[in-house]
Amino acid sequence: MNDSIKTIGVIAGKGAYPETFIAAVRRQPESYRIVLVAFKGETDPALEEKVDACTWTKVGQLSKLFSAFTKENVTEAVMVGQITPSHLFNLQLDIRAMAMLGRLKEKNAESIFGAVADEAAKDGITILSALTFLEDNLAPLGQIAGPKPTAAQEQDGEYGFNLAKETSRLDIGQSVVVRDGTVLAVEAFEGTNKCIRRGGELGKNKQCLLAKVSKPNQDLRFDVPVIGPDTIRNCAEAGIKAVVVEAQKTLILEADLLEKLAQKHKIAVFGK
């Protein structure tokens, strides 16, 4: 193997995030081999053609995941993409995963992913920031896409942003839907998209706003806030007309398509 070529591992869930990361790696001035661990029923099969090596496994099979990396001499890896929340209740755990979970007092996303990172370290694998190579995709301050937010939307944005910061601090969720200073929906285990739908139903297709933020002291290795075209599609379907995100802490995926959809559906997207 050419010593000048580095190797990076990718633990890939669903959505556009893994593909965005892989494309960012390919744009680096240094050459990288990309070793993918993909999850059946979650990861886009098309990604296999974009990497140098790929192993398919099931969520909860830690030994297979790490052995795939050690076999390919992976010493650094990233976690990118979501796992369907409902699938986390139907895991086929191997012995290593069962032992890991058994040691946890709290079983939330942060504690579980943190434990996975600790297990990786035992095999000589460092889990890098999920923002690695993606600094250009971070949300800027101010208008991001769509029309300029109105004064009322900016006011709701302030309200929703502060609420989302508090719910994320309590490890409930990182998104809320508000309208005219009223909380319509708070994200919990079900994820952002279902929170959007619930908020839209209660808001009856009026001027609702989605706020999405990072956790205080966010562990940048996982669970960073992300929005993309699917976020805008779901907001449009639910009647949500504005989205506020935390600037420099939120990843924007497929920005060009997000902009087109935000303009089409007249959804103001801005960073705070």
Image: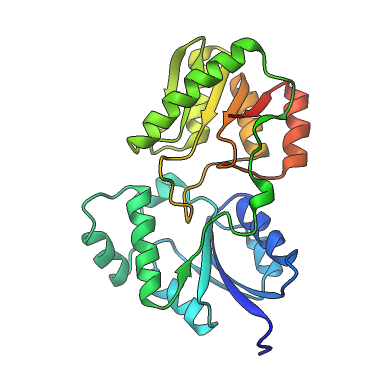
The colour scheme used to paint the residues is rainbow
Instruction: Say if residue 267 shows up in the picture.
Output: yes
In the rendered structure, the answer to whether residue 18 lies left or right of residue 26 reads left
Q: Quadrant of the C terminus?
A: top right
Q: Quadrant of the N terminus?
A: bottom right
Picture quadrant of residue 267: top right
Task: Name which residue lies at 68% across and 23% down.
Answer: 268
Residue found farthest to the bottom: 1
| In the image, residue 224 above or below residue 172 | below
Task: Name which residue lies at 56% across and 20% down.
Answer: 209
Nearest the viewer among 26 and 129 is: 129
In the rendered structure, the answer to whether residue 147 lies left or right of residue 244 reads right
Task: Name which residue lies at 55% across and 42% down.
Answer: 249
In the rendered structure, the answer to whether residue 272 lies left or right of residue 161 reads right
Task: Name which residue lies at 37% across and 63% down.
Answer: 116
| In the image, residue 102 above or below residue 2 | above
Picture quadrant of residue 146: top right
Picture quadrant of residue 101: bottom left
| In the image, residue 152 above or below residue 229 | above
Where does the image place residue 128, in percent across and percent down from the top left? 51, 63
In the rendered structure, the answer to whether residue 124 lies left or right of residue 9 reads left
Q: How many marks?
A: 0
Where does the image place residue 129, in percent across and percent down from the top left? 52, 58
Instruction: Say if residue 206 shows up in the picture.
Output: no
Nearest the viewer among 125 and 90 is: 125
Where does the image place residue 223, in percent across and percent down from the top left? 47, 48
| In the image, residue 58 above or below residue 203 | below
Where does the image place residue 235, in percent across and percent down from the top left? 61, 26
